[in-house]
């Protein structure tokens, strides 16, 4: 009960601070901010279709050389001299496709707003980058991160976290800022837009999280399982808003509790494939946990009493995030098998998405949700930071 009371007191004390920080100049928008999303990487060929007028430009100097009313469905391949598209050859390393008005560009049957850039990689593959304004980018992300049926305050909290993480990631890579998968943020483009997720984006336009005047790496995950993780346990990030907080709001998440069973021989083979030297496994045990109860280090004992140690994150990566859904688990040895009995799903840093849903169900606002999971951070208009 003390734990629950302290959470409620904390939320009551800080909710007003966040509301003040959020009150920025809404006369501006972030439509001038572009995000470069790698929507295809290292492909041999792609499908391309453009429904509506468009312009073509050579990528290095942006020199426009062609325009058309539409492009019928076809396959893009590489030739020695450039890109081969529907019988035409474009002798360039990069090809920029710009829609005119609201023309629809489809790549591999998925629809995207903004420009699409075809890049020939040094090893003769095709990478496709979608350059889109950040608000449209977020609209293409939210459907994949949270349910559009969730309370609007939870979706708004996700919109701010998504926008913040995208801006934090800009210019981190040479040809693109983010990828369209779980290693950045899952992005589906125009085809993933929904009314309620779009509404959440529009109602939080330009809002991001900062700490000490800098954009916060606003990490998030599906379900923390009871307490969020300290970012410094995983990455070289030492930020007070990412130190971890207790969470009593995700208890209804479908992955709050889980169990997975594996053959010890399978684990042995995977360990050996990565250079760990271990014979038949006799025992697998946790040797170190952190304050959020997540596994930091494990001990593996072979039947010849040889012992190796492995980091918790390394084992999760080795077995796969669908087997070890999080690093918060117990181990139960069962002969030639082992049961992993765990809680939560994801790395655990930052906002717990199912926790945000739980808070919204209890009538907390998106400002309060963000201030709880990122304590000490402020919500400001993006233009006040640049």
Image (tube, helix red, strand yellow):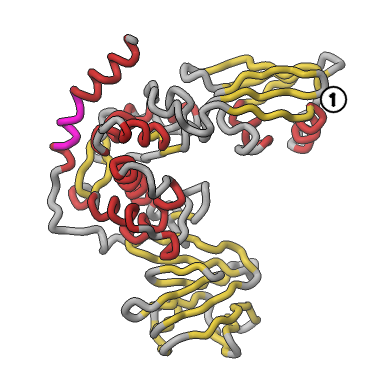
Q: Residue at x 57, y 71 (%)?
A: 120
- The quadrant in which the N terminus is found is top left
Q: Residue at x 16, y 58 (%)?
A: 28
Q: Nearer the viewer, residue 348 or 169?
A: 348
Horizontal and vertical percent position of residue 308 = 73, 21
Horizontal and vertical percent position of residue 367 = 24, 37
Q: Say above or below: 128 vs 271.
A: below
Q: Residue at x 58, y 81 (%)?
A: 74
Query: Which segment did they paint magenta?
Result: 13-19
When asked about the image quadrant of residue 309, the answer is top right
Q: Is residue 18 magenta?
A: yes
Q: Say above or below: 248 vs 314.
A: above
Q: Nearer the viewer, residue 203 or 68?
A: 203
Tell me if mark 1 has few (under 14), some (14-19) or many (20+) residues whose alpha carbon lies within 10 angstroms of its own: some
Identify the secondary structure beneath mark 1: loop
Horizontal and vertical percent position of residue 30 = 25, 58
Q: Which residue is mark 1?
A: 279
């Amino acid at each position: 009960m003390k734990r629950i009371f302290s959470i409620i007191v904390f939320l009551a004390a800080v909710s007003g601070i966040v509301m003040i920080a959020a009150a920025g100049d809404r006369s501006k928008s972030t439509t001038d901010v572009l995000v470069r999303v790698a929507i295809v990487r290292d492909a041999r060929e792609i499908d391309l279709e453009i429904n509506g007028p468009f312009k073509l430009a050579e990528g290095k100097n942006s020199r426009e050389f062609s325009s058309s009313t539409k492009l019928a469905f076809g396959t893009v391949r590489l030739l020695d001299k450039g890109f081969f598209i529907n019988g035409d050859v474009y002798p360039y390393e990069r090809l920029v496709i710009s829609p005119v008005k609201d023309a629809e560009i489809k790549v591999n049957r998925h629809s995207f707003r903004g420009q699409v850039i075809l890049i020939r990689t040094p090893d003769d593959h095709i990478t496709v980058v979608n350059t889109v304004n950040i608000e449209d980018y977020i609209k293409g992300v939210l459907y994949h991160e949270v349910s559009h049926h969730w309370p609007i305050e939870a979706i708004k909290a996700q919109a701010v976290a998504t926008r913040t993480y995208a801006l934090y990631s800009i210019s981190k890579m040479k040809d693109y800022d983010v990828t369209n998968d779980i290693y950045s943020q899952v992005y589906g483009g125009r085809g993933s837009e929904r009314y309620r997720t779009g509404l959440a984006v529009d109602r939080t336009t330009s809002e991001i999280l900062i700490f000490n005047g800098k954009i916060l790496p606003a990490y998030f995950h599906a379900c923390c399982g009871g307490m969020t993780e300290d970012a410094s346990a995983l990455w070289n990030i030492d930020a007070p808003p990412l130190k971890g907080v207790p969470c009593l709001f995700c208890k209804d998440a479908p992955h709050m509790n889980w169990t997975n069973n594996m053959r010890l021989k399978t684990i042995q083979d995977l360990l050996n494939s990565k250079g760990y030297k271990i014979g038949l496994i006799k025992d697998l045990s946790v040797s170190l946990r952190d304050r959020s109860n997540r596994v930091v280090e494990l001990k593996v004992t072979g039947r010849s009493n040889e012992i190796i140690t492995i980091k918790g994150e390394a084992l999760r990566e080795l077995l796969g995030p669908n087997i070890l859904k999080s690093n918060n688990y117990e181990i139960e040895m069962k002969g030639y098998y082992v049961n992993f009995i765990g809680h939560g799903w994801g790395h655990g840093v930052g906002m717990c998405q199912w926790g945000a849903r739980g808070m919204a169900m209890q009538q907390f606002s998106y400002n309060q949700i963000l201030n709880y999971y990122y304590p000490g951070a402020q919500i400001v208009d993006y233009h006040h930071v640049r």
